[in-house]
Amino acid sequence: MTRTNLAPYALDESMTLGREHPEKEHLYRSCYQRDRDRIVHSTAFRRLEYKTQVFVNHEGDYYRTRLTHTLEVTQIARSIARVLALNEDLTEAIALAHDLGHTPFGHAGEDALKELMKKHGGFDHNVHGLRVVDLLEERHPEFKGLNLSWEVREGIVKHSTSYDNPPKVESLKPKLAPPLEAQVVDIADEIAYDNHDLDDGLTSRFLKEDDLKKVELWKGIAEGINKKYPGINSHIRKYQVIRHLINLQVVDLIEESQKNLKKSGISSVDDVRKHKARLIIFSNGIREKRKPLREFLKNNLYKHYKVVRMSNKAQMFIKELFNVYLDRPDQLPPAFYGRIKKDGPHRVVCDYIAGMTDRYAQDEYKKLFQPYERV
């Protein structure tokens, strides 16, 4: 299936390096559309509903989860891909899969597993996401995993942002730059993450709008909203400022990337693959304006004492669960216990815990450590 509406540097379905287990392609759906559908129907994707980012699930049903974040990233990424005439189906599939390897309790959970697995092969959520789609999902009688296309698997493991620095996976050609579709997802992830953490932070009252007036990017947009709508209530103003912030960054990214592609002389996927620097970029002006905003989030939300308390508690849950399963692996479900001989107890326990939702991890903790809780 060859597309005629794509830019010459977009990754057409006809260029795919295929699947690990060859399959006959569908008559009406491209390989990347099938990948998207397999991801959406996977167990790991559904579990994102109860895996959180900053706020743990029981703190309120308004706050973002990994699932709502993933949908927001996908929406932003598709919008960018469409304007740049990239492959929207590939972009969407990578976006939907980019967080499948995340642990319960956000980055706190990942930090705990990194420490616990330091001498046993390590842990990285991108590499674990690849393990999820290649091995841990069981949907087909002929093979383990989802058997996704090479390019979607590459997009999962090469996902790179200021929060992600994935290790190299040799089978996915780490020396090759990721396609533009994957680069779009990386930036869409940052745009969604930053702006929606602002929303959740203000709603939780961990952040105060008066403090944000010191941040130039926020201040300029807020003043414009107040001027246009004098007397607007703070609830609606918050949404309007964040809406304009996202739009400002997306428009800047599209326009700067178009200039960068032209200036770099990119005319094919091979050119993209060989180019050392990222091609999907913000302008210098927006890049500099984003820094104080991100620094504000780091100092006022991610380091808020209540977030730190929850993170420490989450790491305690993870570490104690890990050690009790490691001490008595026969407490694991049979499907995991049966893999210990092949994969070793540390990796199997890690796989089991990484797949948990926040709620499931908390329930397991109660069952294993509280004497009157049913097991």
Image: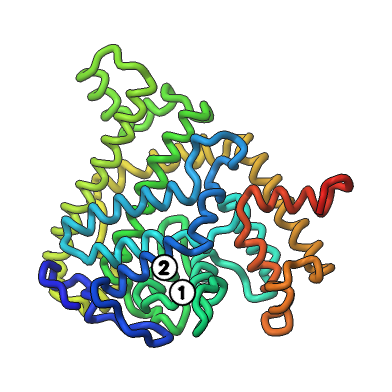
The amino acid type of the residue labelled 2 equals Arg
130 versus 74 height, above or below: below
Q: Residues within 10 Å of mark 1 (few under 14, many from 20)?
A: many
Task: Please state which of residues 308 and 135 is positioned toward the viewer in this rendering.
Answer: 135
The answer to whether residue 167 is visible is no
- Give the number of callouts: 2
The reply to whether dot 1 and dot 2 touch (C-beta < 8 Å) is yes
Among the two numbered marks 1 and 2 on one chain, the one whose residue lies closer to the N terminus: 2
Residue nearer the viewer, 42 or 110: 42
Q: CA distance from mark 1 to mark 2?
A: 7 Å
Q: Quadrant of the N terminus?
A: bottom left
Q: Is residue 366 left or right of residue 28?
A: right
Residue behind mark 2: 38
Give the amino acid at mark 1: Leu
| Residue name at image x 42 percent, y 85 percent | 20
The mark found on residue 146 in the picture is 1
